Image (tube, coloured by chain):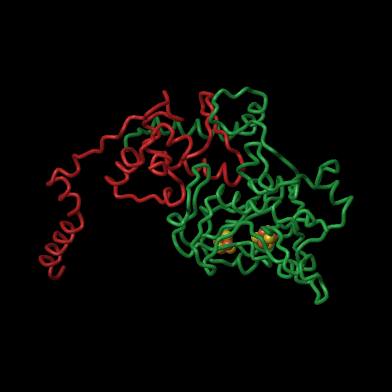
């Protein structure tokens, strides 16, 4: 090794100083103008509790939401193995009778029975997937409630797939990269043996952008916002309209709401 | 000690065998083929000086990984005040564009196979 002791200690010292000064650096960062255009935006979208509100009425017109899944899957390098058994999905369209099983009954309008609504990870406030993960590869972010995934840490035990009552998680049985139609450099791919799911577009929020599916949805069919902010659009919608959630009786506290 | 002759011969053979890869590399001149790395295609200075990066780039990358994924902290401030986006694909590979002529040169020489590339893309290769 060509780093001599002195150099090493110098760097170790600097690194330690750097670590100690980190909170300071964060404060300074907000005030200072950043010159390099390749840096992530200085004004990320932040919230105390991100949530999503999906207008079922607007979804009945399939046109409004038909591009959501594709936009998401293209943005996140989600592979298509061309085989339902190996399917990887972050957001997808589900029949009413499957997505809202307990709301279904035999006299329901046939049209509604088979109407399709977008479903995705609910970023539950009390997420069972997080409790079962042995490596903390999945965890709930303190700052905004997003149920995150760290693909570096996932060991592929799939406990979380069993733990999630919504089928929001998929497993890569094979190397996904050859099965991605067009690779997007803005986002990593995954490797074999790793679980993946929606992350509420955490990487886009950090650049000041709304989630890809929300952007792709027309006519405000999907609205994204801060539940803790009483003035936010999501709170206004939840006040003014009646909403349901998927399997609320399980106590997972899903944070994706469906306006009836 | 009984059979010391045999034991010592055994030990010598063992030592020769276990150090064989070293002798072999010295004898064939393999060890002399220190890899030549491609110069960065742009940028004036790396996030830290060359010697430090040569030895500790993997630690830097691990720290960046944890900062971005676990703490949602994406901007790195170097000791001299310069700011960088903590991204392998967008910052490191922006200057060291070729994985083959930069990263892989040393990794092959040292026979290490990091799994960064299983997930992180190389813009140059994706474009091909
Ligand atoms: S929907 Fe499933 S994967 Fe998402 S937070 Fe809830 S339990 Fe976890
Ligand atoms: S498969 Fe990965 S994310 Fe899921 S529980 Fe196991 S380690 Fe955690």
**A99 left or right, relative to A234:** left
Farthest residue to the right: give it: A240
Residue at screen point 35% across, 34% down: A3
Please name whichever residue, A63 or A125, is drawn nearer the observer in this view of the structure: A63
Letter of the chain shown green in the rendering: A
Q: Quadrant of ligand 2?
A: bottom right
In the image as oriented, which residue stretches furthest toward the bottom?
A106
Is A156 situated above or below B22? below
Count of numbered tags: 0
Q: Name the residue: 73% across, 60% down.
A: A126
Q: Is residue A163 left or right of residue B16?
A: right
Left or right: B21, with A173 as reference point: left
Q: Residue at x 68, y 64 (%)?
A: A94
Chain letter of the red region = B
Q: Nearer the viewer, residue B106 or A186?
A: A186
x, y (%) of residue A22? 60, 33
x and y percentages locating residue A221 in the rendered image: 75, 50
| Visible residue check, residue A98 | yes
Q: Quadrant of the C terminus of chain B?
A: top left
């Amino acid at each position: 090794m060509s780093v001599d002791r002195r150099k090493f200690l110098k760097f170790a010292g600097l690194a330690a100083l750097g670590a100690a000064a980190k909170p300071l650096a964060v404060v300074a960062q907000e005030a200072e103008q950043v010159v390099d255009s390749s840096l992530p935006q200085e004004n990320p979208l932040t919230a105390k509790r991100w949530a999503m509100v999906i207008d079922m009425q607007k979804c009945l017109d399939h046109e409004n939401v038909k591009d959501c899944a594709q936009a998401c899957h293209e943005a996140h390098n989600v592979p298509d193995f061309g085989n339902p058994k190996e399917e990887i999905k972050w957001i997808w369209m589900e029949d009413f009778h499957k997505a809202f099983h307990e709301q279904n009954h035999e006299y329901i309008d046939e049209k509604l029975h088979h109407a399709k609504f977008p479903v995705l990870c609910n970023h539950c406030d009390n997420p069972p997937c997080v409790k079962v993960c042995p490596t903390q590869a999945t965890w709930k972010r303190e700052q905004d409630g997003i149920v995150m995934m760290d693909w570096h840490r996932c060991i592929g035990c799939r406990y979380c797939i069993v733990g999630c009552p919504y089928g929001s998680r998929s497993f890569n049985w094979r190397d996904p990269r050859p099965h991605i139609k067009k690779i997007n450099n803005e986002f990593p791919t995954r490797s074999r043996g790793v679980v993946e799911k929606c992350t509420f577009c955490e990487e886009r929020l950090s650049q000041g952008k709304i989630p890809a599916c929300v952007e792709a949805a027309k006519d405000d069919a999907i609205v994204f916002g801060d539940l803790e902010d009483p003035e936010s659009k999501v709170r206004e919608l939840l006040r003014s309209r009646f909403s349901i959630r998927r399997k609320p009786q399980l106590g997972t506290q899903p944070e994706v709401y469906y306006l009836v | 000690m009984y059979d010391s002759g045999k034991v010592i011969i055994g030990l010598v053979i063992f030592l020769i065998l276990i150090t064989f890869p070293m002798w072999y590399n010295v004898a064939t001149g393999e060890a002399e083929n220190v890899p030549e790395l491609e110069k960065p295609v742009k940028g004036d200075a790396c996030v830290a000086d060359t010697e430090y990066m040569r030895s500790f780039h993997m630690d830097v990358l691990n720290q960046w990984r944890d900062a971005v994924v676990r703490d949602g902290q994406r901007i790195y401030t170097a000791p001299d005040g310069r700011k960088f986006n903590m991204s392998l694909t967008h910052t490191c590979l922006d200057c060291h564009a070729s994985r083959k002529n930069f990263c892989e040169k040393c990794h092959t020489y040292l026979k290490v196979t990091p799994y960064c590339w299983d997930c992180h893309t190389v813009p140059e290769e994706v474009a091909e």
